[in-house]
Image: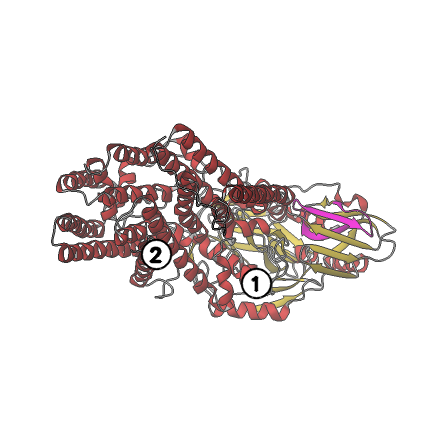
Amino acid sequence: MTSPARPTRAAALLAAAITVTAFCAADALARSYPFGPRTRSVNDLGNQYVPFHAHLWDLLHGRADGGLLVNWQSGYGASFLPDLGTYVSSPFAPLVAVFPRDEIDLAVYVITVLKTASAGAAMACLLLALRPGRWWAAGLLGASYALCGWSVAVASYNPMWLDGLVALPLLCLVGEWTLRGRRPLLGVLVVALAWIANFYTAYMATLGAGLVLLLRLWLSDLTVRRRLLAAGRAVATVALGVGLAAPLVAVVYFGTKHAHPGRVVDFAPVPTEDLLARLLPTTYTFGSPALYVGTAALLLALALPFHRAVPRRVRAGWTLLVVVVTLSFQWGPTHLLWHAFATPQGSPYRQTFVLCALLVIAAWHALSYGPPDLRALGAAGGLLAVIATVAGRSPIAQHTVTWAVLLLAVVGALGGLALLCRADGGQRTVLAGLAVALLLGGQFGEAVATSAAATRLRYGHLDDYAPWGARQQRQAEVIAQADGWPRYRTDPGRDQTVANDPLLVGGQGAQYYSSLTSDVLSRTLTALGGGWTSRGRSLQSLDNAVTDVAFSVGARVHSPPDPHQNWFPQNGERLTVTRQDVPPLVTVRPSGASRASFGPSPYRNQELLLGTRVYTVPRITVRTSTGKPPSGGATGLLIGAPTPASTRKPTITAQCPPGDEVYLWAPHFNGAARLDDGPTGRFRSDGDGKKIAAMQRLGAVPPSGRLRIELAPDRAGRVPEGAVGCLDTDRLHTAAERLKATGATRVSVSGATLRAELPAGSTGIAVVAAPRIAGWRCATGDATAVPATEYHGLIAVPLDGSSTSVTCTFHPPGLRLGMTVGGASLLTLILLGAAAAVRRRRLAPPPASQSTTTRPRERVTGAR
């Protein structure tokens, strides 16, 4: 007799094999990395996920600055555990360690493929657990789920979301176990692993699995009492599993509370024609739900209501669930429920994989009771024709390729299902073989076409970044040679390759891009003249001599603009390193130095942070390309966009002490600026508040003292009243020497702890050149640690004149609470396991007696 596990294993292997082959074939067709010259690092994949995987590689190999709690490389010191839980806590993520460091892009790609294949295998196992059926059909539908539109169009470049794709069928399996009272311990562990891997999509997957379980309970023939018991077991399983994951989930939750706020987005449902168009192959948009699951699976799901071999309650239940979940996508309150009551700032339909799973499960129920007859297939074909007709009005479905692929897919799917229906009546081998060939070929072809189309179309919607190459290799080598941490920081530079350069190429800079970028860091760097994108969550390096002194940046890399971005010409620039004699990470300031607060001028704010006046901020005269004064406004003087008739450039003139360094601060200007023959300052901003430009160094004040800065705007922008600052480098050097003389004599950093030895008799405030994010506790000498105070956004510790050392330790907010909840969940699980073991032992029959006088007990099988 064939073991039930064999078909399940065969189905899982088939689903994984189809998924891997189709996924890679699609990238080869699109000529995408690693099968072609096109990079696949679009949007946050290049800016966040690859760099965070690179940092994980460094952690696993003992090469990172920091540990699990603090990332000393980004944002002058950031909390890392929330980022770990958000981006790289998947059980697949540690696989990066087996790849070379310079193959980090390949490592992330392989992990992406493995996650997608695992989702297909898990779905195949779930389908056979829900109902017995053909193992190869379960494998095909498992691959349909793994290669659904959401997976190939959205999650393929958001690899942490793929953990939700894997989690959903596993959580549905947990629901099956609770329904049958089986594997309670394993169920809790699966829930915990899903929430640890990626709590965001695990939340959606848990909602989806809960809906499936409720339907399964309604369809079962259990008594009301047993249904309630099963539901109770499911609730307890989820509660214990989430409790075990609490140490990470709680830290991420509190990390979001301290993060810089993003924009508030109002949900707007997509038009019906756009919604239906995403059911078709090769369609793509960024802002609509990618519902494609393959034409064969869609036809089966549409045939379910008309399939007379399926019990009516089963037909009605699964059809109604699919319809209800679809409608929930288009209603504001349920949209918020799916997204944990916060509308996403990016793609607004991140829960789409749940509906894709329901469509596949509905298709399985239509097939597992026997192939739909011609009547049901005809009705499904009619519904598909209606869907295609309505979708044809959408601009999404205006490509010839879409209709050509759909036509071939419909022929293959209908032909395969019709042959399969005939094969059930006789002539099984030949017809069944032809049916499988048609179904497999059609599904494979349209999946490859859909994935390849999504890969190509993404380039028109999203920024893209080059994979690791000669530029990054050279940057990493130069940074490693210049590195002096923790004596001083080495900044990777203003001309960034990606938004998380310190994680990718090394060093310790201001650059940091995360959903959890702290509000205090963003506000502090903005007040000092820093630039950012993503509405303040992607912070850039600030190439400024004053802030370099304040943050102990002793070495700075200057790279030419990244040619892959092509934002600005390179003009023959070469990679160089400049060094500056800077104070240590811990300095001592007067007690009253932190009383004043930051104002509108970044130059005055830098002086507050430094503790010394070093800038001249002159009155400026601005002229447009017509030679006339510009109009004013709340954010500065308006510089119009260039016109073909313009023969002159807009200018800024001012008077400063000769020899000073000239800086230009124009956060809402986009273009270039140049002082005489000095370097070109590049400014990138936009008009809707998503990005602002950083302050730029333009050169030295000429001997005449008169400045004339030429502007080359790319579009209309504004220049603030106090845009120009002239830095007295001699005063800055004197201030730096004073801070060195009174600062720490020795600084050591170990993981989440920083220790500094101070000169005897130090009084005032010890200031650590790191943002005062929530979680820092400090102590002087042998005193008890208390929450750190703040010095203009930095960590501060009051000194009493008697202590000669300062120790600061970081504890992520929420970790203690999470550990408490996790410990309680673990203890509860152990006690429940022990109680179950004792109960089983008591109920177990006694061992058979060896005495010949004892008669064996008879088994009672009679009626009650």
- The picture places residue 96, in percent across and down from the top left corner, at 49, 63
Magenta stretch, residue numbers: 766-786
In the displayed structure, 457 sits above or below 315; it is: below
- The picture places residue 311, in percent across and down from the top left corner, at 24, 35
In the image, 284 versus 824, the foreground residue is 824
Q: Crowding at label 1, few (<14), some or many (≥20) Cα neighbours within 10 Å? A: some
In the image, 490 versus 165, the foreground residue is 165
784 in magenta: yes
The residue tagged 1 is 60
Give the CA separation, mark 2 to mark 1. 33 Å
Considering only order in the chain, which callout, 1 or 2, is on the residue closer to the N terminus?
2
Inspect the image, locate mark 2, and give the three-letter code of the amino acid beneath it.
Answer: Arg
Q: How many marks?
A: 2
| Residue at the limit of the structure toward the front, as seen here | 853
Q: Is residue 240 left or right of residue 303?
A: right
590 in magenta: no
- The picture places residue 470, in percent across and down from the top left corner, at 48, 70
In the displayed structure, 372 sits above or below 16; it is: above
Quadrant location of the N terminus in the rendered image? bottom left
